[in-house]
Image (spheres, rainbow, N blue to C red):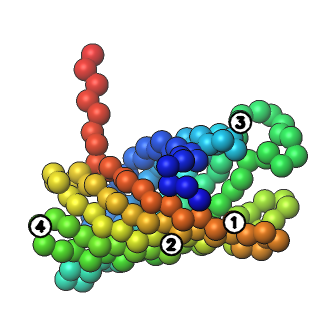
Amino acid sequence: NDLYRVRGSYFSGSLQYDIIKKYLSAEVEYRYKTSRWGDQHRFGIGLTAKYKYKKVSFSLRSVYQRGHEYFNSSYESGHEPTNYLRHRLQVKLDLKKRFELFASVEPYVRFSNKYNGIDRFRSIAGVGWEFVKTHHLQLFYLNQFSIGRKNPAMQHNTGIRLAGLRVLLVG
């Protein structure tokens, strides 16, 4: 409830490939999360379909993700890897001077031996700026809540995303 406390950090990277330029792309991703409640490694693979009409862009991203607190041949109860299907619907509005407004909604469909169904719902709204071609800075608000729990968690987060960085390795 206090803005000055950071409860966790996320570090992620992804590789994308355009299957049909401007319409369909594939990606693989990795994310490491660390917080006071624990750490998690998450791997994902997905497809994104896109459509643009004038200054409005629509996209639907479907991703399979698997998260691990740790890697082992057997896991303690409650610490097993988690599997999710996520389907994000996003709308972007292009503004002048490389600025954009965006909003998205995304249910998290969990599947395992113990539970199958939507257990979280996320919505995001923000503004983005393309400061160099293919390099973006985004400021956003994220709201996420749990579904089907006795005491559902409600998260309100703000974030900054820097996308399009290129790493050059010199040997």
Disc 4 is placed on an element classified as loop
Disc 2 is placed on an element classified as strand
Disc 1 is placed on an element classified as loop
How far apart marks 3 and 4 lie (CA) works out to: 45 Å
From the image, tell me which residue sits under label 4: 97
Tell me which amino acid carries mark 3: Tyr
Crowding at mark 2 (Cα within 10 Å: few <14, some 14-19, many 20+): some
Across and down, in percent, residue 94 comes to: 21, 74
Q: Is residue 109 above or below residue 30?
A: below
Across and down, in percent, residue 14 comes to: 42, 47
Tell me if residue 33 can be seen: yes
Of discs 1 and 4, which sits in the foreground? Answer: 1
State yes or no: discs 4 and 2 in contact (Cβ < 8 Å). Answer: no
User: Where is the C terminus found, in terms of image quarters?
Assistant: top left
Q: Which mark is residue 153?
A: 1
Q: Which mark is residue 123?
A: 2
Report whether 98 appears left or right of 38: left
Mark 3 or mark 4: which comes first in sequence? 3
How far apart marks 4 and 2 lie (CA) works out to: 26 Å
Tell me if residue 61 can be seen: no
Mark 3 or mark 2: which comes first in sequence? 3
